[in-house]
């Protein structure tokens, strides 16, 4: 009987010690550790707020978009231009440049917006190429602006022409291609494209200045003219005046398989052919999406200024 009571007392003593330790641990956690955890969480939240301040351009962007939705397109575009000037670091600037570009492009080709455009009367002996050269434009823009089906012209025909006074600026760091339009003595941002990649020729230093060369439309590696039915689907190339600088679509790598002479194996096992793939040389250029390249192709002409910046 005495032994049983002793065991019970030992058991109760052990339970008491365990409960006491748990109570002390809870007290330490509640008074010390929890407070430290809460302070640490508060500091993290404060640090997050410091790193992510409110975007001052967001409200301006929303107001500009609302103007455009209410058919006040010019006012909305002007508000977006001001946003780019006043808050160039705002995350909304990327979308602002896209919207400005779409509005500008629509206005350039719109028959209802005649500012900066000219009514040209076709003369005897005129061709689209000749008219384009006379008016600092190109065949693609004349065809699109006037809805021409073919290249046949008649003296006395009226054509709307617009000078394509664009500078092309390639930022090799951000991989963007910006069009700057000059009207009179003023130059302004017109449209921006994002390139998949920018690979410059070895040894070319940035910044660099050059001009746009003779544009090419290629089918199976051969040039086609604008009156060729395949012209629309042709691969477009816009070269710079310095070697190795092209605006083009992403090339499709073609691996070349090299078959070596059969090498004899051990006696009695015949011979085997060794096959390997020859690596493709890295091509240079400014690589763009096909639709973006089509737009750029129609907006620039031989002699347009081209700048590479970083």
Image (cartoon, rainbow, N blue to C red):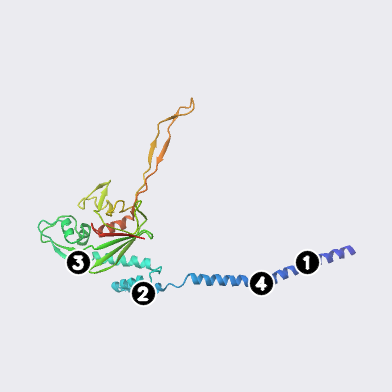
The residue pinned by badge 4 equals: 32
Whether residue 11 appears in this view of the structure is yes
Q: Residue at x 69, y 71 (%)?
A: 28
Of marks 1 and 2, the one in the foreground: 2
Coordinates of residue 21 in the picture (x, y in percent)? 74, 68
Of marks 2 and 3, the one in the foreground: 3
Give the CA distance from mark 2 to mark 3: 31 Å
- In the rendered structure, are the residues bearing label 1 and label 3 in contact, judged by CB atoms less than 8 Å apart? no
Q: Mark 3 or mark 4: name the one nearer the start of the chain.
A: 4
Q: Residue at x 88, y 62 (%)?
A: 3
- In the rendered structure, are the residues bearing label 2 and label 3 in contact, judged by CB atoms less than 8 Å apart? no
Give the CA distance from mark 2 to mark 4: 50 Å
- In the rendered structure, are the residues bearing label 1 and label 2 in contact, judged by CB atoms less than 8 Å apart? no
Q: Nearer the viewer, residue 111 or 170?
A: 170
Q: Mark 1 or mark 3: name the one nearer the start of the chain.
A: 1
Callout 2 environment at 10 Å: few (<14), some (14 to 19), or many (20+)? Answer: some
Coordinates of residue 153 in the picture (x, y in percent)? 13, 57
The residue pinned by badge 2 equals: 63
Whether residue 1 appears in this view of the structure is no
């Amino acid at each position: 009987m005495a032994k049983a009571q002793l065991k019970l007392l030992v058991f109760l003593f052990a339970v008491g010690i365990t409960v006491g330790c748990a109570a002390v641990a809870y007290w330490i956690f509640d008074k010390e550790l929890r407070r430290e955890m809460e302070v640490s969480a508060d500091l993290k939240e404060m640090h997050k707020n410091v790193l992510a301040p409110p975007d001052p351009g967001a409200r301006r962007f929303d107001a500009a978009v609302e103007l455009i939705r209410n058919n006040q397109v010019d006012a909305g575009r002007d508000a977006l231009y001001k946003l780019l000037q006043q808050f160039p670091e705002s995350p909304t600037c990327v979308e602002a440049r896209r919207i400005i570009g779409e509005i500008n492009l629509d206005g350039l080709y719109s028959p209802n917006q005649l500012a900066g455009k000219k009514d040209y009367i076709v003369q005897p002996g005129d061709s689209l190429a000749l008219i384009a050269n006379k008016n600092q434009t190109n065949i693609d823009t004349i065809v699109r602006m006037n809805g021409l089906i073919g290249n046949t012209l008649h003296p006395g025909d009226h054509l709307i022409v617009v000078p394509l006074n664009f500078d092309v600026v390639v930022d090799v760091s951000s991989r963007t291609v910006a069009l700057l339009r000059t009207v009179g003595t003023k130059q302004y941002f017109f449209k921006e494209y994002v390139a998949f990649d920018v690979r410059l020729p070895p040894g070319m230093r940035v910044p660099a200045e050059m001009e746009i060369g003779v544009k090419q439309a290629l089918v199976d590696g051969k040039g086609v003219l604008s009156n060729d039915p395949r012209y629309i689907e042709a691969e477009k190339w816009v070269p710079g005046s310095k070697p190795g600088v092209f605006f083009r679509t992403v090339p499709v790598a073609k691996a070349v398989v090299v078959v070596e002479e059969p090498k004899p194996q051990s006696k009695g096992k015949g011979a085997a052919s060794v096959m390997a793939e020859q690596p493709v040389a890295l091509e240079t250029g400014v690589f763009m999406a096909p639709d973006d390249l089509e737009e750029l192709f129609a907006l620039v002409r031989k002699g347009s200024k081209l700048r590479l910046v970083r």
